[in-house]
Image (tube, rainbow, N blue to C red):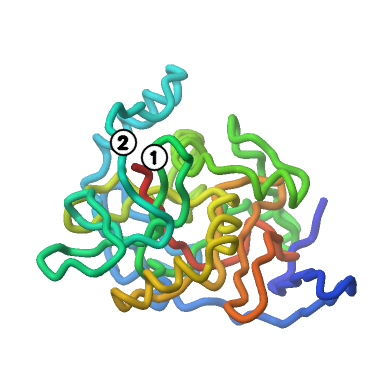
Amino acid sequence: MKKLLYTTTAFVLCGGIVQTNAACIATPSCTAMGYTSTSSCTNGIKCPFGEYWNCANSDLSNKITELENKINSGAGADPSDKTYDCKIGDIFYSDWTCSTEVDANKTPIAVVVYMDGAGHGQALALNSIGRYYWQICSLNEDGLNYTCKDAGAVPNYSSRDSASKDFNSCINTHMLVASGTSNDFPAAWAATYYKTAGTEAGDWCLPAAGIFTSYYNNKDAVNAGFDKVGGVKFSSGWSSTESDNWYAWRGYLSQSSGIYIDYGYDGKQNSYQVYPVLEF
């Protein structure tokens, strides 16, 4: 059995030296994490620390059922014949167009952080939607230890190098949604609930670890895009890429020095920011 303490440890390779930073974390406030409703709601996410719910977009059941059916049938995400003339760092708008400079007549909703070379890519939301656990693990009878589980069909990436090459944001997210409820995988569900002008709940996903690598490799262009629209640059947050039963990968971007794909000591049962990503 693995004992999980409310501490976080990040191992960062700096000039060939591994540094360990540990700090105690106070129990997060439900309301600060986005759980603002005192009443339960259909498909709402319950706060693990009290009787509060996040009821945003609680009418999502039909969309979730559709996604579950796609995953269970092996269909995955819908392929699209449309291609996009976008570049990394471009502003992505609510009408699903993009431009390098701000178009005052359109509503910006994201910044392009990845292109696949075939006219498709992914755009990161302009801000975090809050802090969430990757998974709510079950407390054992001893009251001290937790048991986490492998997330079903989601592939496991055991090394930082392999995780950094995973770009399957929506496939991972849809598999997580199909593998459990919003009380099992809060981060994935929170990303799925997200919607903006021009999008609806179910369009957005939890980014795969490779998206953070692409951000870092193109950070000057991406950060310029965020600056143009007043977005909040990414610094740290969960990915949808799983490592094993206990751990999932998160991205950490030092805006001054670089990005590291790592996981904290508390693994999945740790609270980190969620930046949804839109596949196009």
**Which residue is farthest top?**
73
In depth, the one of 231 and 55 nearer the eye is 231
Within 10 Å of the Cα at label 1, are there few (<14), some (14-19), or many (20+) other Cα atoms?
A: some
| Residue occupying the point 27% across, 48% down | 201
Image position of 111 (left or right of 247): left
Please give the residue where the numbered disc 1 appears in the rendered image: 120
Residue type, label 1: His
* Residue 190 in sight here: no
Image position of 277 (left or right of 144): left
Is residue 188 placed above or below 229 in the rendered structure? above
Label 2 vs 1, first from the N-terminus: 2
| Residue occupying the point 42% across, 69% down | 130
State the image coordinates of residue 90 (x, y, percent, origin top left). Answer: 35, 60
Is residue 181 placed above or below 129 in the rendered structure? above
Please give the residue where the numbered disc 2 appears in the rendered image: 83
* Residue 51 in sight here: yes
2 and 1 marks in contact (CB < 8 Å) = yes
In depth, the one of 139 and 204 nearer the eye is 204
Helix, strand, or loop for circle 2? Answer: loop
